[in-house]
Amino acid sequence: MNTPSQRIASIDVVRGLVMLIMTLDHVRETFYLQHQVSDPMDAATTDPALFFSRLAAHFCAPMFVFLTGLSAWLYANPANGPRSATGFLAKRGAFLILLEIVVINFAWTGTFTPQTVYLQVIWAIGLSMLALALMHRLPLMLLAAIGAAIVFGHNALSGVSFAPDTWAASAWTILEQRGYLIDDPVRVRISYPLLAWIGVILLGYACGPLYARATLPAQRRRWLVLAGVASLLLLAVLRTWNIYGETLPWAPHNTLLRSAMSWLNFTKYPPSLDFLLLTLGVGVLVLAWIERIDAGWVRVCAVFGGAPLFFYIAHLYLLLAAQRVAASVLGVPRADVEHVWQVWLGSALLAVLLYWPTKRFGQYKRDSGKAWVKYL
């Protein structure tokens, strides 16, 4: 049976799952920052528990951007016939950029006058949506080809650079090279270079027809499994022999665990080809698998996936409040935890505390009919 609720529910479930995993990294950055990790991580010295917690969080941004593209195709192709998604994508993208600068930066810095404005994942998603707004009317096969060319080809540009303080250097900072865009009067840092994320959102949009009502569930799952297995097999070849797709080669270590950590140690900023092959490859396999699962935890994930932006903002402000309260109670500038298991526990507590507010808002979003609500 291929009802719309089954078809769309699996998207919400996976989106909610990656949102919950995302909180691991945000709790780490709020309460465990004394054990900072680099990008990529140092496989020889990073505690394995911290390494694999960070690795789990790697799956969040790629799958969220991919599902954003897929959801955009569903918006453009409702049951009553195709419609233009240009206006929705453009307004939504611009709204996300504004949200990043005003609302989300405050959640991270705790001040309305920060010394540095960080342009992170919400900014990258917003700009990717603007790019999709301009391109989504192109033939799907062309969009898929452009997306694949960007995802597979941008690693070849890693050595490109431009003279400082030129428009080309600024454009390259936005597109491919993480760094500071503006130094004065406020520093503006590009944390999520954009180019690869445009490729991911285009691939997500091009995969939209897999979720058309006319597509049989077995056929959809077959294509998702094929794409996932092909991605992981290609990753195995490229990574094992250090052929292409990651600027940091892996090397054997003195233990099997450390060797595996080195092999899995990929660059996120910008996301390398190997990083995307792993995260999207596993992600689409989960999409195929989860469609057939009916369990309580799946329905819980769907709640968070049904109102992801509400949950995203709410959990950041709850973390900000928790850090300030804990620091005040302990009489220290910054409250920290000492163990990775405490980071996992904090993430679980966040999910529990925000489950009902997110569920209520998701219901309000579905029932209200108000135009502004759909942006959250």
Image: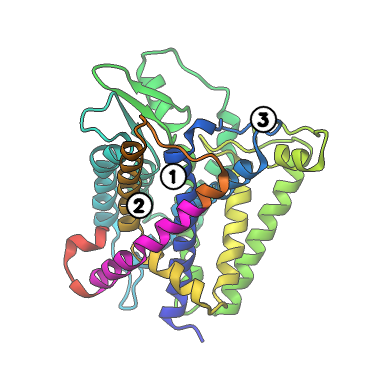
Is residue 299 in the magenta section? Answer: no
- Tell me what residue is drawn at x 30 percent, y 78 percent: 80
Kindly check if marks 2 and 1 are in contact, taking CB atoms under 8 A apart as contact.
yes
| Start-end of magenta stretch | 345-366
Among the 4 quarters of the image, the one containing residue 332: top left
In space, the residues marked 2 and 1 are separated at their CA atoms by: 9 Å
Residue matched to label 1: 26
Instruction: Please indicate whether residue 184 sits to the left or right of residue 30 in the image.
Output: left
Residue 315 - label: 2
Disc 2 packing (10 Å; few <14; some 14–19; many ≥20): many
Quadrant, the C terminus: bottom left
Q: Residue at x 43, y 57 (%)?
A: 349
Depth check: give the residue in front, 215 or 324. Answer: 324
Residue at label 3? 248
How many numbered marks have been drawn onto this rendered protein structure?
3
Choose between 273 and 146: the one closer to the eye.
Answer: 273
The magenta stretch spans residue 359:
yes
**Whole-percent x and y of residue 281?**
62, 55
Disc 2 secondary structure class:
helix
